[in-house]
Image (cartoon, rainbow, N blue to C red):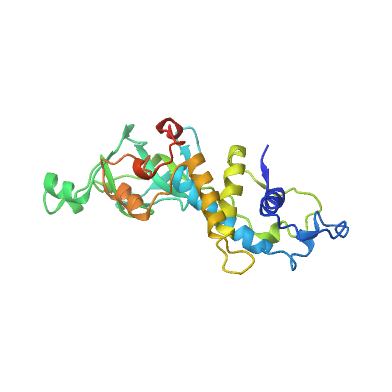
Amino acid sequence: MAIALLSLIGNIRLRLDDLGGDRGEPTAGYYATWQEDDSVCLWKNTELVSYLKSALLDIAGRIPWTTGGSSSDIVGDPTRLSVTAGNPEVALHESTLYVDKVFLASSGLFLEKTESTRLVYLYGENWITNTDTPTHYYEPQRGLLRLYPIPIINDELQLSVRRRCIDEFSWSDVSSEETPTVTLDDIPNDLEEVLILAVCSIAYKKHDSDTLDIEMSREFSRMVDEMVGPPVSWKQKESRRINANMDTAIRGHSYFRSSAVQDSDWN
């Protein structure tokens, strides 16, 4: 059963104790009074939706969704990408965080991840113009794969990736719902609690005399860390992209990891 967006926001408000007071029943056509009018609430509905999007990105960085393309028959899916003869560059779907494996349909082989410096070492300064069936790939920038050698036929890549949530949503989607019907289909139900905690952690950083509470923010953040591990820095993400020998399951150093988070939680 998918998570209903309006219900999730309601549960976040319950945890924040920010339902806007006892105002009776909502007007016909609305689910709750805080949905109908959030003017008396400490956090506005649009703010909570914005915090929810930030929380999803943060959590995906720690425990990315895993998707493989080998079972799909539709070229153009996020994990099945078209290759054009003569063009070594392939754009990744915007939801992709890390690439685990790259399978080339024509050769029936997995491509080896490498680095441009190693290609220079192995094939000389003119490696970048070599053409043949690709055997390697590297990531020159986030969101882009470059194949080596340059492909000589149209082909297809089938990827195994770690990605973020692909649900797109905004407050306007649920602002006038009478019952919660808009769902976040790409988010596992098991993540609802950690999403509530993460949003609360962000919410208590709002710079207002009635909302700013650094200690509460830290406590909610601690609970998030216990459930999904510590945050992954941009530097760690970039190291994973650039270095061919780094595991995709990167995470914060064990020194900073809560004792409640064990290595087995990441497998």
**Residue 4 visible:** yes
Q: Position of 215 compared to 3: left or right?
A: left
The image quarter in which residue 255 lies: top left
**Residue 186 visible:** no
Question: For the view shown, which residue lies furthest in the front direction?
Answer: 215
In front: 123, or 140?
A: 140
Q: Position of 158 compared to 11: left or right?
A: left
Residue 229: horizontal and vertical position, in percent? 45, 42
In front: 91, or 225?
A: 225
In front: 47, or 200?
A: 200
Judge whether 97 appears above or below 36 on screen.
above
Residue 218: horizontal and vertical position, in percent? 51, 53
Q: Position of 236 compared to 81: left or right?
A: left
The image quarter in which residue 263 lies: top left
Q: How many marks?
A: 0
Residue at 43% in and 37% down: 259
Q: Quadrant of the N terminus?
A: top right
Q: Position of 222 compared to 89: left or right?
A: right
Residue 118: horizontal and vertical position, in percent? 17, 46
In front: 244, or 140?
A: 244
Residue 51: horizontal and vertical position, in percent? 58, 58
Q: Quadrant of the C terminus?
A: top left
